[in-house]
């Protein structure tokens, strides 16, 4: 599996994309728009940064099968299944090339299920083996926290 970008390059491209999001679409954060609205716009800017990759929101497939993570339903009482819908992924559809997975949160709360997903999705021993993961929390325009994951661990 060949990757075209080093982790630092991926992080830089994500930072550029977030900067464009804040410049062009701050209204979404300011107005309380849904997380899906914000992640969709961020995905558009990521597609520009990763032109040779597919950037998808809530992509729930692994080939013809639903995307699942064993044990994820135990992380929350609201979860009824191990099926997952990552907020944004940068990948090559219908291949094993998984570059970046992003879980987003709008507001001040962390989501333990998102953190667990990122650890499992970036694990080298797991089924998906994303090169790098990101938990991006947008509290406001001035309070953005980025938590990176690789090899199943927070960095």
Image (cartoon, grey):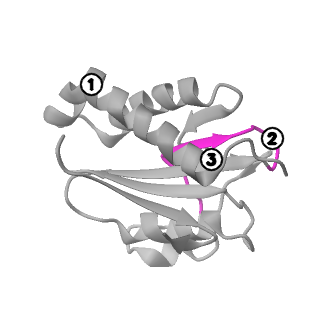
Foreground pick, 122 / 87: 122
Segment colored magenta = 83-96
Residue at image location 71% in from the left, 61% down from the top: 129
Foreground pick, 42 / 64: 42
Image coords of residue 62 (percent x, y): 74, 50
Tell me the SS state at disc 2. Answer: loop
Image coords of residue 115 (percent x, y): 44, 68
> Do residues under tags 1 and 2 come within 8 Å of each other at their CB atoms?
no
Is residue 107 shown left or right of residue 64? left
Return the mark for residue 77. Answer: none
Could you tell which of marks 3 and 2 lies nearer the N-terminus?
A: 3
Which residue carries the number 2 mark?
A: 94
Count residues near mark 2 (Cα–Cα under 10 Å), then give few for <14, some for 14-19, many for 20+: few
Which residue carries the number 3 mark?
A: 60
Tell me the SS state at disc 3. Answer: loop
Does residue 108 sit above or below 12 in this rendering?
below
Could you tell which of marks 3 and 1 lies nearer the N-terminus?
A: 1
Q: Magenta span has 132?
A: no
Q: Give the Cα separation between the discs numbered 1 and 2.
A: 33 Å
Residue at image location 79% in from the left, 46% down from the top: 63
Q: Give the Cα separation between the discs numbered 3 and 2.
A: 12 Å
Q: Is residue 81 visible?
A: no
Could you tell which of marks 1 and 2 lies nearer the N-terminus?
A: 1
Residue at image location 38% in from the left, 67% down from the top: 78
Which residue carries the number 1 mark?
A: 23
């Amino acid at each position: 599996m060949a990757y075209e970008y080093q982790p630092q390059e991926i992080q830089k491209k994500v930072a550029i994309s977030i900067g464009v999001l804040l410049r062009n679409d701050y209204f979404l954060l300011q107005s309380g728009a849904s997380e899906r609205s914000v992640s969709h716009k961020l995905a558009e800017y990521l597609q520009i940064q990763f032109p040779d990759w597919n950037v998808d929101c809530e992509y729930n497939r692994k080939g013809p099968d639903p995307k699942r993570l064993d044990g994820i339903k135990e992380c929350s009482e609201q979860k009824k299944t191990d099926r997952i819908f990552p907020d944004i992924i940068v990948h090559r559809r219908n291949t094993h090339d998984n570059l970046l997975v992003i879980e987003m949160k709008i507001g001040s709360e962390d989501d333990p299920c998102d953190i667990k997903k990122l650890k499992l999705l970036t694990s080298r021993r797991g089924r998906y083996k994303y090169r790098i993961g990101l938990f991006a929390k947008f509290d406001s325009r001035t309070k953005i926290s980025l938590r990176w994951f690789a090899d199943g661990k927070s960095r």
